[in-house]
Image (spheres, grey):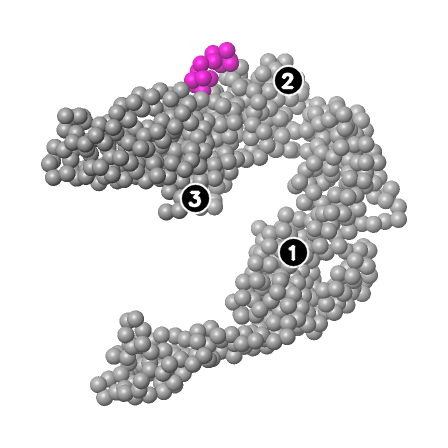
Amino acid sequence: MTKTQKPRRPTPAMKKEKRSSPGTAAELLLEIGVEELPYQFIVPALAGLKDSAEQMLKDQRLAFQSARTLGTPRRLALVVEGLAAQQTSMVKETMGPSKAVAFDQAGQPTRAATGFAAGQGVAVQELQIRQTPKGEYLFAVKQEHGRPAKVVLEELLPQLIAKLSFPKAMKWNNTGVRFARPVRWLVALYGGATLPIEAAGITAGNRTEGHRVLGSANGIVVRDYETYLKGLERQGVTPDPQRRRRTIEEQIATLCKETGFTLNVDGDLLDQAVFTTECPNALIGSFKSAYLEVPQEILITSMKEHQGFFSLMHKETGKLVPHFIAVTNNRAKDMGLIREGNERVLAARLADAKFFFDEDRKVKLGERTAKLSGIIFHQKLGTLNDKTKRTKDLVEFLTKQLGDEKVVVISRRAAELANNDIVTAVVGEFPNLQGVMGGEYAKHDGEDPRVATAIAERYLPRGMEGPIPQSLEGKLLSLADRLDKIAGFFRVGIVPKGSEDPYALRRDALSIVRILVEGNLPLKLELVLDKAEKILAESKIEELRLGMAQGSFDFIVERLRYYAGTAGGITRSDVIDAVLTPKNTHELSFKELLECMKALESVTTKPEFDPLIIGFKRAHRLVEKEKDRVVFHPVNPALFQHPSETKLRAAWAKNDQLVRHLIAERKYSKALEAFVSMKPAIDDFFAAVMVNADDPSIRINRLSLLKDIDELFLLFADFSQIVVQGS
């Protein structure tokens, strides 16, 4: 290539990333056979396997039609349909130095040109000069031919297996490989042929294992996905999780129909049944009716957490019956033996639960308070006894804010006892029953029923899930407990970061939002958090840095933003942004804020709304632009030069007090109608007059008039955040 060479016009073969035909497609089957995996690991592992496989195949330019995963406790499988036999070829173009830098005055390549060529693996003579918007530059054009899929997969699949991650992993041989459980076999087939990949010290073949009990010792020879499915089915394995789920649901429905009982539906328990079995078989068992004297929450939890059993309810009364459904991983001729075994194990568990319950009731809930001094809530926030005292003070403040003195005594007593069930035997065995058992023991001890109810409702709701407390005392206790927790952690500088939230503060903040909104509590969040801060300060909780109280306030408001866009039904994020101004969030309750959003979103559908916002934004921009450069003053009607000014002033005077009154009365739709009625006056003003008049007094008078309009609109929301549809 010489200096006088003209840039060649790229031929079709030189176009960037031109791909050739991938050739004949075939099927890929990969199975990782393992010791029994914890059921919680399987769904994330299958999702990760699918996502990683799809991304790797795309990165390697291997075209495919579809990818899916299957899984049981003993296997994770990937099936890729229509996988190309060869990588697609492509032309890769890389821009190098400019022509002026690449050649000297004699037209000879400089070190910049030779270095670029060497780095790209091409000869200097093969470089092309092309015209670009920045001038003439050198380009290296390389043809990358696709390799056979078999070769690529032999490199790719071990990486795919190694990339799988688990919450906990282990080593079991000298390869140093970490996996959730030991890998025992590998199947890797492409187009029916074995891919002899190696991972975790095992070389892949074409032989898989059937059910641990129902399968044969020789395993199953696999040719493709079809023979894989059929072979496993013959040896007692249903590899498709969705099919196992349907099987379990149908079996349970049949048992319920035969017995007349109703299933206590539990999605987590169903997931557990699906991913702890390869050959699911549901059976019904029973336990002694004497155990029904124990609160049903204990029995249900014991059956679920200890045995993975489904509980059953009476169809008419809705109460627990002395029967259960177990989903076994076996298919025996005599399922009676398996039933009896499950009944014996459950009987021992329920006997333990009854013993714990009986022993707990020998000590009154109020007598357990002293033990809380020995339990650390958090090293920076003191003991559980310290937290109880703070919660008691805060719940009293909340009660008085609502003006309901009648519930002060009840709320304080509930807060006093709320943490005491932590030191009971039942809660020690089943931590998720905290609160529920406190309510039971308070009832047993003869406490006021409202105290027992409030304690039982103390942990409701659990974020976005489940009902909120129904009693006022329960709402106040739940709020006080969570507000103290959030204010405390923010005070000592422990706040959620990114996806990390070890103390579930986001869930607590969302629960606070739900109680305030759905519980229709007209509490001012800022006022309550200020009180929580004062209580923490009085308790000698050291503040890490100033301003953290405002951080906790903003943190909870952000959860309101999320709630509004989901459960609140607000579809426009600009409406949420417009309403959640600092003024509104400090002055209005969460219930009122959500009502404002609903009213505003409703009015946005009116045809005159978008033109109104265009006019408002024009006024808002002018005021914002000039606010630091002019001194606004009361509007002087004597300086008006056009009827449109008088008309706009009259519209403002008519609606100023009206809007304030409507907002105070929570008649938000009416207030918005008042704004909409001002549209003609705003339009006429901008059509008739020039705001930036030559006469400074007239200019400032018009800007002051617009400032009054701007401030009136901002009483309701920041309408400058509204996106005019179509703009």
Residue 398 colored in magenta in the image = yes
Residue 631 position, x and y percent, is 15, 32
Is residue 454 something one can see in this rendering? no
Query: Which image quarter holds the N terminus?
Result: bottom left
- Total numbered badges shown on the rendered structure: 3
Is residue 105 something one can see in this rendering? yes
Type of amino acid at the residue the image marks with label 3:
Lys
Residue 72 colored in magenta in the image = no
- Ranked by sequence position, the earlier of labels 2 and 3 is 2
**Magenta region: which residues?**
396-409
Report, in whole angstroms, how far the alpha carbon at label 2 lies from the one at label 1: 47 Å
User: For this rendering, which residue is in front, 716 or 106?
Assistant: 716
Residue 445 position, x and y percent, is 63, 16
Type of amino acid at the residue the image marks with label 1:
Arg
- Pointer 3 residue: 497
Q: Which mark is residue 181?
A: 1
User: For this rendering, which residue is in front, 563 or 38?
Assistant: 563
Q: Which mark is residue 443?
A: 2
